[in-house]
Amino acid sequence: MDFQLTEEQQLVRQMARDFAERVVAPTAAARDREHRFPREEFRQAAALGFAGMLVPEEYGGSGLGNLGQFLVIEEVSRACASTGVTLSVHNSLTTSPILGFGTEAQRRTYLPRLASGEWLGAYALSEAGAGSDAAAIACKATRDGQGWVLDGAKLWITSGNEADLIIVFARAPEGITAFLVETARPGFGVGKVEEKLGIRSSSTVEVQFDGYRLGPEHVLGEPGKGLHIAFSTLDGGRISISAQALGITQACLDASLKYADEREQFGKPLRSYQAIQWKISDMAAGLDAARLLAWKAAWLRDRGLPHTREAAEAKLLCSRLANRSADEAVQIHGGAGYTTEFPVARYFRDARVTEIYEGTTEVQRIVIARELMGR
Ligand SMILES: Cc1cc2nc3c(=O)[nH]c(=O)nc-3n(C[C@H](O)[C@H](O)[C@H](O)COP(=O)(O)OP(=O)(O)OC[C@H]3O[C@@H](n4cnc5c(N)ncnc54)[C@H](O)[C@@H]3O)c2cc1C
């Protein structure tokens, strides 16, 4: 067994760390405060190949694979979880299903635009009545000659008001079907923009379809096979949300070490107290263990091996760890941690959503149990 990253992976990680420190970190607090989308950060990420991490070079991508992408999302999320999820949804939830289920023509049409960052991608499964129970979606694709007409609304769509292309799951006569929806065409609209607890620089909106026309060239995969596409895409997305959660955890550890070194009480720095050391040790041990599990899930996905359980386990443990670590990081900072003067308050708010999206903590446990016990 080899625990060493390849030279290329180490280079990618270093490049992502430099990018995160130079471009993403300096604007993170202000974007969070102003609820400002990381448009310029996304443009610069794309210039480094981070908008096409799962896309092979022949379609204009950087072909880093899931493990390479994991390293990038973790580093970016360490600086800003909002920029991390923007990249995660674009790569894992948009480019990945097009590559996996698209026709050659769809790959040639969409992947180069997405991989270059000219277009931004989104993924629309959730609805008001269909969250954990994704199969309950009501968004309707009615047959119209050779094509379909799409009507309905999707809720909580990350980057939905910024995206050029959205993978939309709708109920067609053939069953739940995945469609490629270009947002510049008539019949597409944006509804409510969510005010969120955290990841405030990421946009989360309602998207609406009113008589939006779709041709056969807009169907992703086979009609009626949409749920399979949705869930196998989420297997990959959960690995990348694990990376986001670990990026937040690493940031909590970094900030805690620094503060424990600088802050003195009772005549000694906080780092000299065992109660503080234990919190920091738990964060570090958790990070090392969770990272190995998540890397394994990414490694399995890169090899086309079964990874549904490992992806759910990684998401479960990494997101729980991020929340626990953010809680302890605020505690280590005392009153200062409860203010915006230190970044740990942002980490605390940002960590929360990692237990909710792409399947809640409870849903990950359902997935794991189902894999263990069968349906
Ligand atoms: C910031 C943000 C961004 C998002 N981005 C996207 C996106 O880009 N695309 C997209 O499609 N969706 C997105 N979502 C939606 C997200 O995936 C859903 O919120 C999530 O799947 C949970 O669904 P829900 O909110 O309807 O909660 P519910 O399903 O109503 O669940 C409420 C609670 O009940 C629990 N629960 C539900 N069913 C069971 C059960 N059978 N057993 C035990 N407990 C259960 C849940 O775990 C949860 O704790 C986003 C959400 C947020 C908050």
Image (cartoon, helix red, strand yellow):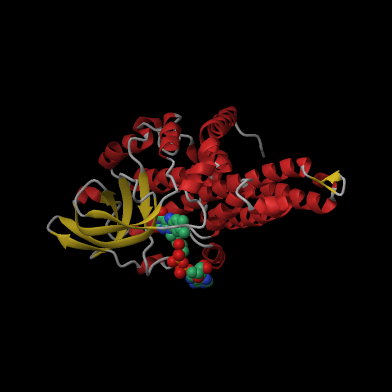
Q: Is residue 233 above or below residue 51?
A: below
Q: Is residue 323 above or below residue 94?
A: below
Left or right position of 53 against 141 = right
Residue 3 picture quarter = top right
Residue 287 x/y as whole percent: 67, 47
Residue reaching furthest to the right: 267
Left or right position of 312 against 212 = right
Q: Is residue 42 above or below residue 320?
A: above
Residue 251 x/y as whole percent: 63, 44
Left or right position of 255 against 205 = right
Viewer-proximal residue, 223 or 24? 24
Quadrant where the N terminus sits is: top right
Viewer-proximal residue, 165 or 233? 165
Name the residue at 40% across, 65% down.
134
Name the residue at 73% across, 51% down.
332
Number of numbered discs overlaid on the protein picture: 0
Answer whether residue 38 is visible to the viewer in this image: yes
Name the residue at 38% across, 43% down.
95
Residue 85 x/y as whole percent: 48, 47
Residue 236 x/y as whole percent: 47, 49
Answer whether residue 100 is visible to the viewer in this image: no
Left or right position of 157 against 239 = left
Name the residue at 36% across, 64% down.
127
Residue reaching furthest to the left: 145
Residue 351 picture quarter = bottom right
Viewer-proximal residue, 345 or 104? 345
